[in-house]
Amino acid sequence: MTTSNDNNIADMTMRTYDFIVEKKTAYLDIFGDPKVTGKIGTDIQDNKCSWLAVRVFGLCSSEQKVILSLCYGRQDTGKESKVKDVF
């Protein structure tokens, strides 16, 4: 029989696992090799508000924020490359 403490530990473990998977998925969407991941990442072009985009925007310089504002969410591989350079 499981106790309340066991349930709390299981809940914390699942939240930690979900946190890690979310970060890994966002990272691989941007930097993963489609030959390895089996998927072409579209978070940048789709203007997704991923943890990575939010974190980078919060840490980058004013000049980099301008680049992100002009290039993030655009359907243009050149602009995608500029975003990746900032990341």
Image: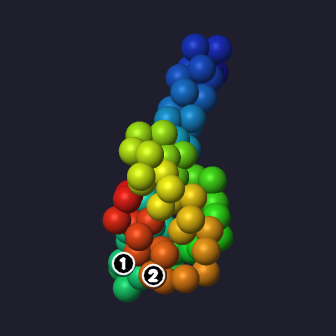
- Residue type at numbered disc 1: Asp
Q: Which residue is mark 1?
A: 33
Spot occupied by residue 36 in the image (x, y as percentages of width and height) = 36, 79
Spot occupied by residue 74 in the image (x, y as percentages of width and height) = 61, 74
Residue 83 or residue 49, whichever sits in front: 83
Q: Is residue 60 left or right of residue 72?
A: left
* N-term-proximal mark, 1 vs 2: 1
47 to 64, vertically: above or below: below
- Residue type at numbered disc 2: Gly
Residue count near mark 1 (Cα–Cα under 10 Å), binned few <14, some 14–19, many ≥20: few
- How far apart are labels 1 and 2 at the CA level? 18 Å
Q: Is residue 70 visible?
A: yes
**Residue at 45 percent of width and 81 percent of height:** 78
1 to 36, vertically: above or below: above
Which disc is residue 22 wearing?
A: none
**Residue at 48 percent of width and 51 percent of height:** 65
Label 1 vs label 2, nearer the camera: 2
